[in-house]
Each structure stands twice: as C-alpha cells, then as structure tokens.
Image (cartoon, helix red, strand yellow):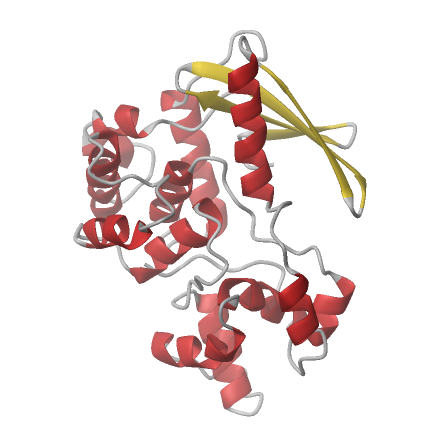
Amino acid sequence: MDGLTRLRGGVLHRLVHAGEQPVLVRVAQLSPRRVLFGARAAERAAAEWGIERMRLALGVDQDLSGFYERFRFDPLIGGSVRTSPGLRPAGKPDPFEALAWAICEQLIEFGRAAAIERRLILRLGRRCEWSGMRDAPTAATLAGQAPALLESMDLSGGRALALVRAAREVASGRVDLFDTSQPEQGWRRLRAIRGIGSWTIQMLALTGQGRLDQLPAGDVGYLKLVGRLRAGGDPYARATEEEVMDFFAPYAPWAGLAGLHALRSAGSVAVARVAA
C-alpha cells in the first residue's frame, strides 16, 4: 500500500476529507464489472462526496469502450487491451495529492520517493481518531511549512521549495485543481514555478484529474521503451520526450492510457518516476 490505503480481507480502505470532515471510504471488487463502495462520515453529504472522489480516482465510471474497440488489435498494445480491459492509472482522490507526490517523485527512484511521502503523511497529514488512518497533507498545511523542514524528510532543496510554492498557489485559490473545464490555466501557473516541468503536470493531470490524454512523456520508462522500439530493439537506445509524444500521438485522446498498456506489453511492472 502507499501509506494512505489499507487492504483488509480484499477490501480497500482510504481516508479522505470533505473540507475538515474525515470520510472513511471502503471499496470491494465483487466481480470484473461490479465494484461496491461504502463510506462512513458524520454527514451523509460528506460520505457521498468521499465515494465520488474514490470513484474518480479508480476510474470506474470512465467509458473506455471506444478505446477498446479502436486498439484491441493494435500491434503494440492490443494484447494488453484484450487481456486487461479494465486497466486504469493509479489515481488519487485529491488532485493536490497527485501534484505533491509528483513533485516528490521527480528525479528520484520510486522507493525513496515513497519513503519521503510516508514521512510527510506521518508528520503533516491529518489523522482520523475513530479510524486511526491518515490522509495526505493539505495544500494549506504544506504552504505554511519552511522548505528546510521538508528537506529534513529527504526532499532536495529545489523540490522542497517547489512543493511549498505549488501548495501556496493551490491554498490561495490562484490554482483550482478541481476545475476540469479549464485546467490549462492552472497548469500554466504551476509550470511557472521553478522545478515544475511537463512531467509533473502530466502526472497531476493523469493521476489527479482523470485526464487519460496526458502522457508523462519524460518518464524514463517511456524514453527507454520508445527508444528501443525506434532502434529495432537496441536495449541502450533512448528517445527524446518529443519523440515519445510523437510515438503516442496516434492513440489520442487516450495517450496516457495507451502508455500504460505499452509498458505492460513490454514487460514493465511500473513507470519509473525519474523525470521532471
């Protein structure tokens, strides 16, 4: 688990917050086509909000029939599409969590980044008294931290400063990550922060805002994959970020999802997060 979720008896447990109100959401996969959601909160509206956010994070309401029909016999990803039609990105219920974790995972191996995220959760995350679980730190909480504190948790100085500045943009309302109608405006403000590049924004969009068209093209997994394919199997070949984007352009508007299937088809277990 990622430090925020627990798996007990095949049931996924996740704490989220509707404002300041804790909501414990439980998710059970009953069959390939049936997923059961339940939530506990002080108010019904908060419980319903928590279920909605987890449905978005897990992508259960995304209609991928068009993707399946179009690419089920694709030479590269067709096999994966047919055998794993339910494959989705590992989404986050709060888009700020996706942004914060993307900043933590820049230019670093995933195991080390996950350790940093666990420290942030334990030190700055909100704890629910009756469930004993914790949620990720809020934008307001991180906005008020000294970068030196985040550095003490093994973040580099540049990433610590970028995280605090991004949190301030979100906490102030200058960037609304829940606005899916015009997300590009928020992306541009975040891109103006030193240390936040295209990979970070693409990870935010893909895992925090449900944008399956967004591909983290600078990821080393894609640079290796496309480089190898373009070079006829040379394991040492590397593509550029632009070449990765061009390679996956025919899969629009599902480039991000196609990328996951391509990595799976190539035998990759996960995307290595080492690009900014």
Q: 11 or 39: which is nearer to us?
A: 39
| Side (left or right) of 90 relative to 207 | right
Point out residue 145 in the picture as x, y percentages from the top left corner. 22, 26
Point out residue 213 in the picture as x, y percentages from the top left corner. 46, 63
Total number of numbered discs in the rendering: 0
At a point 24% along the width and 40% down the height, the residue shown is: 175
| Side (left or right) of 28 relative to 159 | right
At a point 24% along the width and 30% down the height, the residue shown is: 171
| Side (left or right) of 83 relative to 89 | right
Q: Quadrant of the C terminus?
A: bottom left
Asked whether residue 210 appears in the rendered view, the answer is yes
At a point 20% along the width and 34% down the height, the residue shown is: 168
Q: Is residue 54 above or below residue 75?
A: above
Q: 233 or 43: which is nearer to us?
A: 43
Q: Is residue 257 above or below residue 112?
A: below
Q: 50 or 142: which is nearer to us?
A: 50
Q: Is residue 72 above or below residue 116?
A: below
